[in-house]
Image (spheres, rainbow, N blue to C red):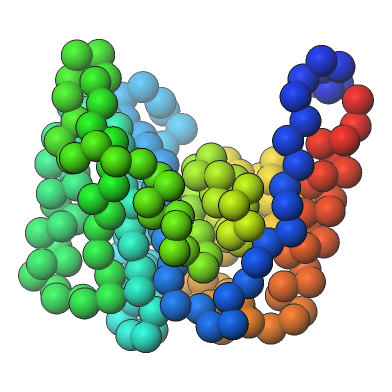
C-alpha cells in the first residue's frame, strides 16, 4: 500500500541519548492484550516477565523496575489479578533487585477503576538508564528524555515495533540477546549505533 506523510503533521525529533557511566537502573515497560485483539495472547507478557526474572538474577548490581500496563487489570484485558499475580510471584521468589512499579495510573476505563495509586510514567523514567519493552510508546517517551531503549519480542510472532526497529534501534528475541545489550551498554560501539538509529529516525521524521 502506497503511503505518504501528512504535510501538516507535527514533527517530533528524537534527541541524542545520554548514556550513564555505569548501568544501574533498568525500566521494563509492558504492553497490553485481551479480548479486544486476536494478535496477542494474554500470556505474551509472561515471556517478557520471566526473561527479566532471569536477567535480574544474573545482574544483582542493577535495579530493575517492571512497569505493568495500566489496563491489565480490566476484566477484558489481562485480568483483574494480573498485577497481583506478578507481585505475589516476586514476593515468593525474593528477587531484591526486581520490583513492580507502583507508578501505575488509577484511571477509569469504561467505568472500571484500576487498582493502583495514581502517579505517572514520569516517576519511573526519572532515574532510568535504559528502557526495555515490546512495542510500548513509553520507549519513545523515554527516548525523548534522552534515555536509550531496546525492543524485545520473545513470542515468536511478528515484531509489532518493526516500524521503529528498522531504523537500527536494538532489538532482542532471546534472553541471551538481552544480556548482551546489558553487557554492551557502556561500549562506544553500542552507543554510536544507537545515535545512528536516532539520526535515521529523524531523517524519516523530517520528510514531507
Q: Nearer the viewer, residue 34 or 190?
A: 190
Residue 107 vs residue 110, the one in the foreground: 107
In this view, the residue in front, 174 or 108, is 108
Name the spot of residue 132 as percent of width and height, x first.
49, 59
Residue furthest to the right in view is: 208
Tell me which corner region of the image, top left, top right, bottom left or bottom right, holds residue 126: bottom left
Relative to 151, is 191 on the left or the right? Answer: right
Q: Is residue 28 above or below residue 98?
A: above
Quadrant of the frame with the N terminus? top right
Does residue 171 show up? no
Left or right: 153 in relation to 61: right
Question: Image quadrant of residue 111?
Answer: top left
On the image, the x and y values in percent for residue 149 come to 58, 59
In this rendering, does residue 163 appear at all? yes
Q: Residue 143: percent from the left, percent from the top?
A: 62, 52
- Residue at 26% over, 20% down: 109
**Image x and y of residue 187, in percent:** 69, 83
Q: Is residue 178 above or below residue 1?
A: below
Q: Going 23% across and 32% down the picture, which residue do you hit? A: 106
Residue at the (77%, 54%) spot, across then down: 198
- Asked whether, in this view, residue 189 is left or right of residue 141, the answer is right
Q: How many marks?
A: 0
Q: Residue at left 90%, top 32%? A: 207
Instruction: Give the vertical position of 165 relative to 107 (above or below).
Output: below
State which quarter of the image contains the C terminus: top right
Front residue of 144/87: it is 144
Amino acid at each position: 500500500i502506497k503511503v505518504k506523510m501528512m504535510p501538516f503533521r507535527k514533527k517530533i525529533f528524537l534527541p541524542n541519548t545520554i548514556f550513564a557511566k555505569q548501568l544501574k537502573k533498568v525500566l521494563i515497560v509492558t504492553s497490553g492484550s485481551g479480548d479486544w485483539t486476536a494478535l496477542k495472547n494474554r500470556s505474551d507478557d509472561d515471556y517478557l516477565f520471566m526473561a527479566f526474572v532471569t536477567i535480574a538474577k544474573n545482574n544483582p548490581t542493577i535495579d530493575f523496575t517492571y512497569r505493568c500496563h495500566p489496563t491489565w487489570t480490566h476484566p477484558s484485558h489481562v485480568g483483574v489479578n494480573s498485577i497481583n499475580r506478578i507481585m505475589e510471584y516476586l514476593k515468593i521468589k525474593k528477587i531484591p533487585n526486581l520490583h513492580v512499579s507502583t507508578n501505575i495510573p488509577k484511571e477509569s476505563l469504561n467505568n472500571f477503576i484500576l487498582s493502583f495509586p495514581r502517579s505517572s510514567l514520569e516517576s519511573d523514567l526519572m532515574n532510568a538508564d535504559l528502557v526495555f519493552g515490546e512495542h510500548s510508546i513509553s520507549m519513545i517517551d523515554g527516548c525523548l528524555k534522552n534515555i536509550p531503549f531496546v525492543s524485545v519480542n520473545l513470542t515468536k510472532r511478528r515484531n509489532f515495533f518493526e516500524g521503529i526497529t528498522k531504523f537500527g534501534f536494538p532489538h532482542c528475541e532471546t534472553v541471551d540477546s538481552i544480556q548482551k545489550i546489558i553487557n554492551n551498554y557502556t561500549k562506544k560501539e553500542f552507543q554510536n549505533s544507537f545515535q545512528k538509529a536516532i539520526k535515521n529516525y529523524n531523517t524519516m521524521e523530517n520528510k514531507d
